[in-house]
Every structure is written in C-alpha cells, then in structure tokens.
Image (cartoon, rainbow, N blue to C red):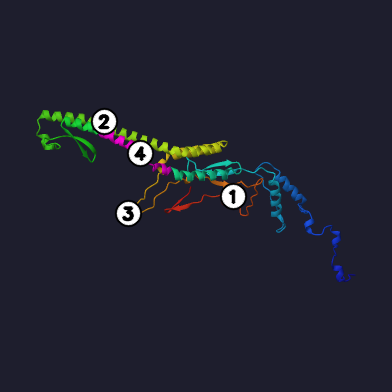
Amino acid sequence: MAEPLKPEELVRICNPEELGFTTTEEVPTLHDVIGQERAMRALDFGLGLPEQGYNIYVLGESGTGRTSIVKARLEEKAKEEKVPDDWCYVYNFHDPDRPRAINLPPGKGSAIRDDMDELIEALKRNIPRVFESKDYERHRDEILEGQQERTRALFQRLEKLATERGFLLKKTPAGLAVVPAGKDGRPLSQKEYEELPREKKHEIDENTRFLQEKLNDAVREARNIEKETKERIDALDREVVQYVVNPLINELIEKYREFENLVSYLEEVREDILRNIDAFRPKEEFTPFGIKLPRVEPSFERYKINLIVNNKDTKGAPVVVETNPTYYNLFGKIEYRFQYGVAVTD
C-alpha cells in the first residue's frame, strides 16, 4: 500500500564536498555531445570525405542544439583546412558582358584592389594634366601647322597651274572645282562658253579634264596629309600617356609578376587606356538648348577590382551559415543602377 512521502524525502540533497570543485570555472569544457555518439561518428565520417558533392542531413528535436553542434564541429574541422583563395571580378576587355574571375592567394585580392584604386587616382590626376601642359600643346601645334602649310602649298601650286591655263579654283557646296575664267577674271558663264569658237571650246575642255585630274590628285594628297597628321597626333598622344601609364602599370606587374592571370589583366588595362586616349581627356562644359551641363571628368570605373571573396583575415577554411538558401543567396545576382532612365551595370 502506497504511503505518503515526507517533504524532506522529495528533495535530493547534493553535498558540494562531493563535486570536487569550488566553482564551475574550474571545470574543463565539455566538447563531446552527450548521448549522440553514433550521430557524431556519422558527422565526422561525412566531414572526412575529401570529395565534393556530398551532403549531411541532421534530424532531431527542436531546441536540442543541432545547429550549434554541427557548426562547432565544422569550425573545429575548418581550422585544419587550408585558407581558400580570394576571388575578384575584373573587366573583360574582349567581352564586356562577361567579367573575368581571377583567384589569388588570401590577402592578395584586397591588396590588388587597393593598388588599382591608387592607380586610378594617379591616372585621374596625371592623364588630363599632360594634355593641358604647354609642352604637349606646343608639339601638337607644330604638327597641325605643318599639315596646314603642306596643304596650303599643295593647293597654291594647283591654283598657279590653273591660272596659267586660264582657270580658277572655286569653292562649291560639293568642294573645290576648276572653272574657266572669263576676260574680267570671273568664272566663264555658260552663255559665254557657247559663244566661243569650237577650237577654244576644245582647248577649254582639254584643260578642264587635265586640271580636274590634278585637283583629284591634290584632294587625295590632302587627305593623305590629314591622315598622316592624325597618325602623328595619335602617336604623340600615345607617347605622353605612356609616360604616365607605363611606370604605374610596370610597378604593379613587377609586384604581382608571379600571378600570370593578373599580369595579363594589367597588360590589357595598359592597352585599353592607350586605345581609348580620347576618353581620358577632360571634357569641356556642354550647353545643349541653353542648359549648362557640368564638365565631364574621365571615367576609370572599368579598371576597378570587384573583390567578391576576401579571405585576408580568415583562419583556416571559412564556415558559411546560410539560413535562407535561395538561388540569389547562394549564387548572387547582378545589381543595376538607373542612369538617365536606363538600367546599367558595370
């Protein structure tokens, strides 16, 4: 027959002397999971697989510490692993819609990002400055004056030849033309031409064909002079920009010479700058329809490094906890900004 218990029988008395410590600070931390030996063996087995493509599913009651237990074991395992590379996105000069991914040892990603930011600031200061220098303007003016002098001399010779044959060089909406001159020095009218003797008409026609050929030759020569002048100015521009760009790029190439993918990218940056020199000239204020727009400064945005994964301060392998593993959270997405009503991205 059941008997009622006394109050003192409902309490288990713990003698502190039997615990073997004074405070819990003296107790070593318990790393094992109580009562889950089989589960922990399975977890350790899964974490020990070197191949990719395996998953571990953990099942248990809510509040039993599944997440904290797995995370703690992962962090313990991660300490033994190698720190993974940094990953950067850089501009693809051959296919702008597909940025290049470059992996670098831990810490190098942030280093090249900072170095490229410094490079961009130096280019912003120095490239516009060389185009505004007096030395550059003097060399450019010499080239243009040489072109003008050669072109002027070319048409002066043609004009002299035309005058000797009784013709004039006349500007028309379609360009220069050779026309026979009348007695008063003005172009011969059609009526005056019709009144001339047949022999005179024949002579004028022959001279017209001859001078027209000379005019065509002179126009072609003038275009060649213009083309040559442009090439000389382009060469001058390239030379002065190289004076700014080469020391900066060469310094980075020397610093990162052991990384071939990064060196090739820096070479592409150099060539892209030299191919697009006009883009780096300071633009003057533009006032369409009376609206004054600010002076447009050169843009160097595409030379910036987009550091996606930075393991500079990572110890061992990183443990990433994603409680909402959506597609965008796992793989990322392209972000856009609106510019003049159009969505753009770099």
Q: Residues within 10 Å of mark 3 (few under 14, many from 20)?
A: few
Quadrant of the rendered image containing residue 277: top left
Q: Is residue 148 magenta?
A: yes
Q: What residue is drawn where x is 57% and y is 51%?
A: 327
The residue nearer to you, when weighing 333 against 312, is 312
Viewer-side label of 1, 3: 3
Q: Are marks 4 and 1 in contact (CB under 8 Å)?
A: no
Label 2 sits on residue: 217
Instruction: Please report whichever mark, 1 or 3, sits nearer to the chain's N-terminal start.
Output: 3
**Any part of residue 228 in sight:** yes
**In terms of secondary structure, what is the magenta stretch mainly?**
helix
Viewer-side label of 2, 4: 4
Q: Give the magenta-colored segment's residue range.
A: 127-153
Number of marks in the rendered image: 4
**Residue kind at label 3, given as amino acid type:** Phe
Disc 1 secondary structure class: helix
Q: Are marks 1 and 2 in contact (CB under 8 Å)?
A: no
Q: Residues within 10 Å of mark 4 (few under 14, many from 20)?
A: few
Instruction: Please report whichever mark, 1 or 2, sits nearer to the chain's N-terminal start.
Output: 2
Q: Which mark is residue 330?
A: 1
Q: Is residue 223 magenta?
A: no
Task: Compute the Cα span from label 4 to label 3.
Answer: 34 Å
**Residue kind at label 1, given as amino acid type:** Leu
Q: Which mark is residue 289?
A: 3
Q: Are marks 4 and 3 in contact (CB under 8 Å)?
A: no
Label 4 sits on residue: 138
